[in-house]
Image (tube, rainbow, N blue to C red):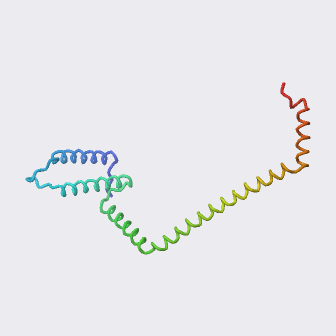
Amino acid sequence: MLRISTQRLIRLHRLNFEDRIRFTSSHKNPTPENGLTDKSRSLENLSERYSDLENKLMAKMKSHNKLRFRTVALGSVLLILWSTNTFGKEIKRFVGGQTAEVARETLRHESIQIQTQELAMAVVNTLLTDSQVLHGTSRFLQIAANDPATKLD
């Protein structure tokens, strides 16, 4: 297996980058004699971008075999496309069902919160209108007001 150090890869990438800068700067204004048209320039640019992306991904994955990397990448894309085509309706139905369940639970929780607030308000109103509670509260406040431990100096 071929092993290349990270520093060597960085040096090679820098050399590639410098070569590309020299090449693109020398071909900025193509003339008809060098044969570069807008289409070929855009294809060249696209090819460079793809190459950069491929190199970055390979470096990130610590892969040095370009053929194996391209085979795995193409196989992954084809597998995703096949899975989407074959199971797309089931996946859509499942995700839709999960979304509906989350929405249902959220509405249920909001309903429970509203019911809890209504119950708390009813309890407070009952306590405020109950004569025994009112008498007990006023007696507690009188005792607290007359107690020297609760008075501020």
- Of 41 and 6, the residue lying toward us: 41
Quarter placement of the N terminus: bottom left
What percent of the width, then of the height, locates residue 121? 76, 52
In percent of width and height, residue 119 lies at 76, 56
Q: Identify the residue shown where x is 40% and y is 68%.
A: 80
On the rendered image, what quadrant is the C terminus found in?
Answer: top right
Residue with the most extreme top position = 153
Residue found 30% across the figure and 62% down from its top: 67
Is 51 or 145 nearer to us in this picture? 145
Residue nearest the viewer, comparing 70 with 95: 95
Of all residues, the one furthest to the bottom in this rendering is: 86
- Does residue 150 appear to the left or right of 11 in the view shown? right
Q: Nearer the viewer, residue 4 or 21?
A: 21
Residue 52 falls left or right of residue 90:
left
Residue 54 relative to residue 95: left or right: left
Left or right of 7, for residue 117: right
> Residue 143 occupies which quadrant of the picture?
top right
Count how many numbered circles sit on residues in the image.
0
Q: Residue furthest left?
A: 33
Q: Is residue 89 above or below residue 57?
A: below
Residue 71, quarter of picture: bottom left
Q: Residue at x 25, y 46 (%)?
A: 17
Q: What residue is at 45 percent from the left and 73 percent from the top?
A: 87
